[in-house]
Image (cartoon, coloured by chain):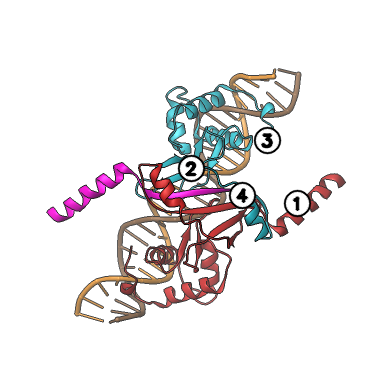
Chain colours: A cyan, B red, C brown, D orange
Amino acid sequence: MQDASQIRMTTQRKTILEELEKVTSHPTANEVYDMVRKRLPRIGLGTVYRNLELMSESGMILKLEVGGTQKRFDATVHPHYHIRCISCGKVDDIDIPLIDNIDRNAADLSQYQVLGHHIEFSGICEPCSKSDEEDEEEVLIN
Amino acid sequence: MQDASQIRMTTQRKTILEELEKVTSHPTANEVYDMVRKRLPRIGLGTVYRNLELMSESGMILKLEVGGTQKRFDATVHPHYHIRCISCGKVDDIDIPLIDNIDRNAADLSQYQVLGHHIEFSGICEPCSKSDEEDEEEVLIN
DNA sequence: TTATGTGCAAAACATTTGCAGGAGT
DNA sequence: ACTCCTGCAAATGTTTTGCACATAA
């Protein structure tokens, strides 16, 4: 892991971190880019990617390797689980207690040095389940 | 979900499924392509992608949305958990018992209609932990 | 002052898609 | 026959990278 104390606090990095702390929505790199660009219109997408990567390596933020096509980022660094809507791709926190004995369990059953685990629930979020009902109506109408 | 009985059994699909059943390594689409190409040299990568997608929608195979940049595929369709090597990206099965009460737990704590969950352990596989030691030696030598 | 970081653009990857011809049922 | 499927190639979407210039410490 990167040593956070060696990372220069540039305007770009500070802004990315501040914007990420403002939201609970686990934005993608491109969404972070859009948020940050309102304050720093000349920032490059490459800079956003480089910094999200660097900050996640140093433990300042969390990189979520959830399902879907894009990585997502989270300023909440303490371990917690997530739920993803299979319809719209949105990711929310799920605050159930951590299962703390399971890593040892996995270590006993594998040849791996186990470092941790992540649970991803999948489901349908409320807005999507409503628009699904509308879709069904549309089907009936047509 | 697609109805499996309506899917035509083409040579390409049969071969993809057979090759996937031969291995336990959770190959990526490109790895499946390489495996199948030995038997069907003219198959296209697009066909492999289309069929892996179709077969996972119909429940014939499992699409693993694990960490890393690529999706992985598994002919073992019963629910089970996985462990991924953060060094080489390899994915193995972990045969710990399923946690069957946790979905209700998540449903109570969220606005989602919960459909299921997946646990992904992360760790370092045995071959990688050995080559890491070699790397450390190299650092000392240089 | 100097190692690091940035903006920009191009490259690299992973995946999807349009289309004309081919094959399963 | 009549769909559905395939190979091919081009397009799309995401992430990484090379380089000349800028800037935090």
Secondary structure under the numbered disc 1 in the rendered image: helix
Q: Give the residue pinned by disc 3.
A: A2
Which residue corresponds to the image point at 68% horizontal and 38% vertical from the top-left?
A: A1
Query: On what subunit does the disc labeled 2 rest?
Result: A
Decide which of tag 2 and tag 3 comes sooner along the chain: 3
Tell us which disc is closer to us: 4 or 1. 4
Specify whether disc 3 shares its chain with disc 1.
no
Q: Give the residue pinned by disc 4.
A: A101
Q: Is residue A77 left or right of residue B54?
A: right
Which residue corresponds to the image point at 43% horizontal and 51% vertical from the top-left?
A: B103
Q: Give the residue pinned by disc 1.
A: B132
Decide which of tag 2 and tag 4 comes sooner along the chain: 2
C-alpha separation, residue under disc 3 versus residue under disc 4:
28 Å
Which residue corresponds to the image point at 64% horizontal and 34% vertical from the top-left?
A: A58
Specify whether disc 3 shares its chain with disc 4.
yes
Decide which of tag 3 and tag 4 comes sooner along the chain: 3
Q: Give the residue pinned by disc 2.
A: A96
C-alpha separation, residue under disc 3 versus residue under disc 1:
17 Å
Mark 1 closeness class: few <14, some 14–19, many ≥20 residues within 10 Å:
some
C-alpha separation, residue under disc 2 versus residue under disc 3:
30 Å
Residue A77 visible to an observer of this rendering: yes
Specify whether disc 2 shares its chain with disc 4.
yes
Which residue corresponds to the image point at 54% horizontal and 32% vertical from the top-left?
A: A47
The residue range painted magenta reads A117-142
Query: On what subunit does the disc labeled 3 rest?
Result: A
Q: Quadrant of residue A50?
A: top right
Tell us which disc is closer to us: 3 or 4. 4
Question: Residue C15 at what x, y percent from top left?
Answer: 44, 55
Query: On what subunit does the disc labeled 4 rest?
Result: A
In this rendering, the answer to whether A75 lies above or below A112 is above
Instruction: Examine the residues drawn in magenta and state their main secondary structure.
Output: helix
Tell us which disc is closer to us: 1 or 2. 2
